[in-house]
């Protein structure tokens, strides 16, 4: 068997990876660029992969991608350029490096040991930031609910009404409406 056993199938309109013949399961380099792939299906059947080119497909689910990549322990080079997952996922590079600790090249850029170490730190800081944003959002919701209750009978406690109104106004609702923060909050709540 040659040092690098390549299976090259670019632009073949392959939409899923399944029922891979055993003869192909020993390949070390798989080229599937420009195929319209939406899922990596049974990519883990290529357990010896060192190089994987998935450029210009339709991969968009970061969780599925990370799960499948975790099943490729020898992966050293990965190309995902042109996939929606890169545009829609915050800290995508860090997420991939946290799972694929043996990568040497990611999206045509060299990966250093510092990159891999910093990936974990970046994700931990992101988690802390998300926790802060979620707490702020929960606090805002509590103030808004209290404000709505007090609006129904403001005579009961006018000081509390003013306090809750100020708190609700001070929170920048436009920040929550921004799609990035909303996605981060939703992702955090989903993972928590």
Image: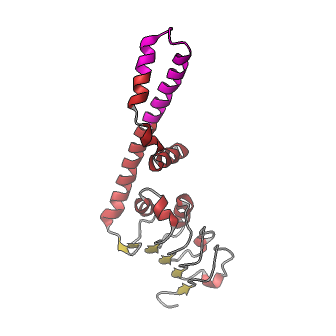
Count of numbered badges drawn on the protein: 0
Q: Residue at x 42, y 18 (%)?
A: 162
Question: Which residue occupies the foreground of this view, 13 or 41?
Answer: 13
Q: Residue at x 40, y 38 (%)?
A: 132
Q: Residue at x 33, y 63 (%)?
A: 115
Q: Is residue 113 left or right of residue 68?
A: left
Q: Is residue 23 left or right of residue 153?
A: right
Magenta-colored segment: predominant secondary structure = helix
Q: Residue at x 46, y 30 (%)?
A: 140
Asked which colour scheme the image uses, the reply is secondary structure
Question: Which residue occupies the foreground of this view, 51 or 82?
Answer: 82
- Look at the image and give the residue range highlighted in magenta: 135-164
Task: Determine which quarter of the picture holds residue 116.
Answer: bottom left
Q: Is residue 1 left or right of residue 129?
A: right
Is residue 139 within the magenta segment?
yes
Picture layout, residue 7 above or below residue 46? below
Is residue 184 within the magenta segment?
no
Q: Position of residue 147 (x, y in %)?
A: 50, 21
Task: Determine which quarter of the picture holds residue 117.
Answer: bottom left
Picture layout, residue 187 above or below residue 165? below
Q: Residue furthest left?
A: 114
Picture layout, residue 158 above or below residue 25? above
Q: Residue furthest bottom?
A: 2
Q: Position of residue 23 (x, y in %)?
A: 63, 85
Q: Position of residue 79 (x, y in %)?
A: 46, 74
């Amino acid at each position: 068997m040659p040092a690098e056993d390549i299976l090259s199938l670019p632009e073949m309109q392959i939409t899923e990876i399944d029922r891979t013949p055993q003869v192909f399961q020993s390949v070390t380099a798989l080229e599937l660029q420009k195929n319209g792939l939406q899922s990596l299906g049974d990519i883990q059947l290529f357990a010896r992969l060192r190089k994987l080119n998935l450029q210009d497909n339709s991969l968009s689910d970061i969780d599925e991608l990370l799960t499948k990549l975790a099943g490729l322990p020898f992966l050293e080079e990965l190309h995902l350029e042109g996939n929606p997952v890169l545009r829609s996922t915050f800290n995508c590079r860090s997420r991939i490096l946290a799972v694929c600790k043996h990568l040497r090249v990611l999206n045509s850029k060299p990966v250093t040991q510092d990159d891999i170490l910093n990936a974990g730190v970046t994700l931990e800081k992101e988690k802390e930031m998300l926790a802060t944003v979620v707490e702020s959002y929960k606090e805002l919701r509590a103030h808004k609910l209290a404000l709505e209750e007090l609006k129904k009978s403001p005579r009961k406690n006018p000081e509390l009404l003013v306090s809750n109104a100020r708190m609700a106004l001070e929170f920048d609702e436009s920040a929550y409406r921004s799609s990035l923060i909303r996605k981060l909050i939703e992702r955090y709540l989903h993972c928590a």
